[in-house]
Amino acid sequence: MNGTGTDPAPGTDPGGPDELPVRDELRGKSPYGAPQLDVPVRLNTNENPYPLPEPLVARIAERVADAARSLNRYPDRDAVELRTGLAEYLTRTTGHPVGRAQVWAANGSNEVLQQLLQAFGGPGRTALGFEPSYSMHALIARGTGTGWLSGPRREDFTIDTDAAVRAVTEHRPHVVFVCSPNNPTGTAVDADTVLALYEAAQAARADSGGALVVVDEAYGEFSHGASLLPLIEGRSRLVLSRTMSKAFGAAGLRLGYLAAAPAVVDAVQLVRLPYHLSAVTQATALAALEFTDTLLGYVEQLKAERDRLVAELRAAGCEVTDSDANFVQFGRFTDAHAFWRRLLDEGVLVRDNGVPGWLRVSAGTPAENDAFLDAVRKLMKENAA
Ligand SMILES: *Cc1c(COP(=O)(O)O)cnc(C)c1O
């Protein structure tokens, strides 16, 4: 309805999706929408602030030119060379051996997660995540017709293992999301918690083949602790999801991947679109993998800046959640959105994820972080005055 009591004639400009015969569960909903504002200091989407190094840019141009010579053909549908490279990267950086058959890649880890829900979720099934967490988990559930269940966290945003296990046992979800390090709060989840959730999820759905547990490790490279990757060993329903968007500084590339039992990789192939990963994407990602050491050097710099942000924000009188990621959650504000606005007036864009009292800032370059910290100190003084 358009509010006037008369429907527009079929075929005339309808004015919005709600005027169209969209699925009921999409009616009145908003798309994912981090503001893309043009301000001097943008620390709102956890991007890597460092542009790719010039030698890598040159190598991308070379590999893409090579790929361009065969663009008349469909790309390697199974992305064999790329998956081999990603398996080697995981093996080398985690010390846990992973083979190509255990790795799958797609256009961003969001697409990986969507494929997982297309294969393991869907109408009549449910997925459970512990909120606040990455909002796309719930949005992808909605998009794939999967029911969404919100599991609990403690006041300090860590997962209370007993409470979490109770939620899984009670709701019997088909898919469980564990985001570690968690976005937007920043803290990593320990292996014991993931194992307890895995056992509970399998027990709860023992009559129907178990449940999939997805560990979203988009920020894994930034963590103080080790990757949870070794947990996939002998656990055929545990999936680890990763991305080149954060640690590799390549959000624009759109390349995410998973590691799991080969049977999980076979399952997502049932739902992936054929040739979903373009030859240009595969060539670019392969070039990036050649520069792993350089890119992980930036990760070390960002970790140091992240730790500095935590310390300086605490010194400025803010509460800060422990961070294993390339961002920091800080508060507590009686009106977080008002503080967000005032930071924006100072030329600094951070993220209001809608967690009451809290905001999130991505670690930027030292100069960007200084500008952010100066603005916070100024506003905190004004608040105190
Ligand atoms: C940024 C982010 C992703 C990455 O999504 P891509 O599609 O790979 O860019 C996935 N999970 C979490 C928790 C994130 O914060």
Image (tube, rainbow, N blue to C red):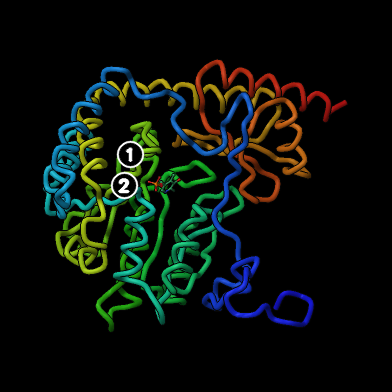
Residue at the spot of label 2: 256
Q: Is residue 37 visible?
A: yes
Please name the amino acid that badge 2 sits on. Answer: Gly
**Other-residue count near label 2 (Cα within 10 Å), few / some / many at <14 / 14–19 / ≥20:** many
Asked whether 7 or 48 is in front, the reply is 7
Q: Secondary structure at mark 2?
A: strand
Q: Is residue 95 visible?
A: no
| Residue 326, image x, y percentages | 46, 33
Please name the amino acid that badge 1 sits on. Answer: Met
Q: Quadrant of the C terminus?
A: top right
Q: Which residue is drawn at the image coordinates 24% and 23% (left, top)?
A: 293
First-in-chain label (1 vs 2): 1
Q: Is residue 345 above or below residue 158?
A: above
Q: Which residue is drawn at the image coordinates 26% and 18% (left, top)?
A: 55
The reply to whether callout 1 and callout 2 are in contact (CB within 8 Å) is yes
Q: Which residue is drawn at the image coordinates 80% and 23% (left, top)?
A: 381
Q: Is residue 301 above or below residue 233?
A: above
Asked whether 219 or 77 is in front, the reply is 77
Q: Which mark is residue 290?
A: none
Position of 358 compared to 280: left or right? right
Residue at the spot of label 1: 244
Q: Which picture quadrant has residue 31? A: bottom right
| Residue 117, image x, y percentages | 35, 67
In three-dimensional space, the C-alpha distance between marks 1 and 2, rounded to whole angstroms, equals: 6 Å
Mark 2 and ligand 1: say if the CB distance to the nearest ligand atom is below 8 Å.
Answer: yes
Mark 1 and ligand 1: say if the CB distance to the nearest ligand atom is below 8 Å.
Answer: yes
